[in-house]
Image (spheres, rainbow, N blue to C red):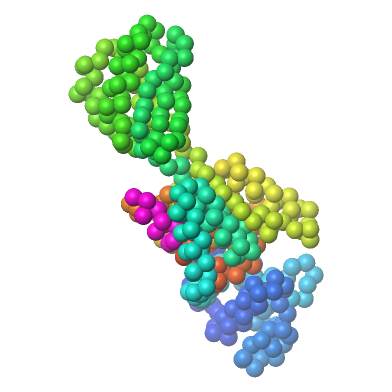
Amino acid sequence: MSKAPEDFLAVLNSRSQDIFKKLVEQYLATGAPVGSRDLSRLLSLGLSPASVRNVMADLEDLGLIAAPHTSAGRQPTQEGLRFFVDAMLEVGAVDERERSRIAGQIEGQAQKGNLEDLLTEASQLLSGLSHGAGVVIAAKSDMVLKHIEFVRLDALTAMVVLVGQDGAVENRVVPLPPGLTSNALTQASNYMAHLVVGRTISEARAALESQQAEQRAELDDLTAKLVDAGLATLSTGGSTPTVIVRGRANLINDTMASDDLSRMRQLFDELESKEGLIDLLGGAETAQGVRIFIGSENKLFSLSGSSVILSPYKDANEKVIGVLGVIGPTRLNYARIVPVVDYTAQVISAMMARKK
C-alpha cells in the first residue's frame, strides 16, 4: 500500500526534500536518470556529489527513487512521482497566449453546433498543447424526446421508434402480446407520446412509472402490456460512453521497445472497446477538479505505464457529463499540463451552459 505524503514528509528533512524535488524536476525535463554529480551542480545547497549520493541512497531505501537497469543515475519511482505530485508540485496559471488559443478554437467550433466536433476539437487541442494524446470521454446524453411510436414488424414483434429533438433516432425491438390489434398499437403509441414528448428519456420513464396505478385502468390488458414493454426499452441502452482520442502518434514512436509498443497499442484498443470508461466517468462525478493517475493507479492505464491527467466537464445543471485530459508518459510536465486540462474543462463547461 502506498504511503501518504505526510508519511514521507515526516521522515525527510528539508535537505532531502530539496534534493528529491530537484531530481524529479530534472527527470521530468529531460527524461533521463539523474546522477549525484549533476544534482550537486543544480542545487544551491553547496553539497558535494558524495553528500548528495548519501541522500539519494536514503531516498532509494524509502522507495522514492530507483536506478533503471545499470544506470548510475536515479529516477523517481511511481510512488515517488505520486509523492511529488501530491506534496511538491507547483502548478501555475495557463499563460494568456494558451488561454486565448484554447478559448478561441473551442468557441469557434461551438458556433458550428455539432457537439461531437466540439469534443474532437478539444481532444486535438490537448494533444497539440501537451505533445501527448488528448482524450475526451463523454457520457451518452439523455435525449429529449420529440416523437415516440410503435411500428409493427410482424405478429409478435414491434419496433419502438424514439426521435429526439436534436434529430437523433433510436430504434428498439419489443415483443407484442399475442392478439394485439392495430388499434391497440395506435392507442399505446398515443398514450406514451402524451406523457413522454418534451421530456428526457429518464424523465419520460419516471412519468410513465408514476402513471401506472392511476391511468392504466383506461387501457385494456394487451395495450397495457405493450406500454410496459415500451417502458422497459426506456430503461435500457445508452450507457456506453463516447471516447475520442487524438495524438496517438505522439505516444507511439520508432524508438519504443516492442513490449512498450504492444502495451501502448493495447491501451488504445481498450479505450476503443470502452473497457473501464464507465468506472472512470463514475469517479469523475465525485471528483473535485483535476485528477492525476500515475502508472498502475488506474486499471485502464496500468498496463501501458502511462500517466493520465483528467478533469470533469459539466452541463448547465452542474452535472458531470464527461471527462477530458491528456495521456502521456509518466514524465509528463505536470506543472504545465494540469492547468491546461483544468482550463479546457472550464471552457467546455461554459459552452455546455450556454446550450441550456
Query: Predominant secondary structure in magenta?
Result: helix
Pick the quarter of the image with the N terminus: bottom right
Q: Position of residue 141 (x, y in %)?
A: 43, 42
- Can you name the residue that lies furthest to the top here? 179
Q: Quadrant of residue 221?
A: top left
**Residue 53 visible within the image:** yes
Q: In the picture provided, is 84 more to the left or to the right than 347?
A: right
Is residue 342 toward the left or the right of residue 316 in the image?
Answer: right
Q: Is residue 15 above or below residue 351?
A: below
Queried whether the magenta region covers residue 347, the answer comes back as yes
Q: Residue furthest left?
A: 214
Nearer the observer, 10 or 208: 208
**Residue in the picture at 45% in, 49% down:** 113
Asked if residue 91 shows in the view, the reply is: no
Q: Which residues are magenta?
A: 346-356
Q: Is residue 306 left or right of residue 68?
A: left
Q: Residue furthest bottom?
A: 46
At horizontal 62% and vertical 80% (from top left) the residue drawn is: 22
Residue 133 in percent (x, y) is at: 62, 57
Q: Residue at x 32, y 11 (%)?
A: 183
Q: Quadrant of residue 269?
A: top right
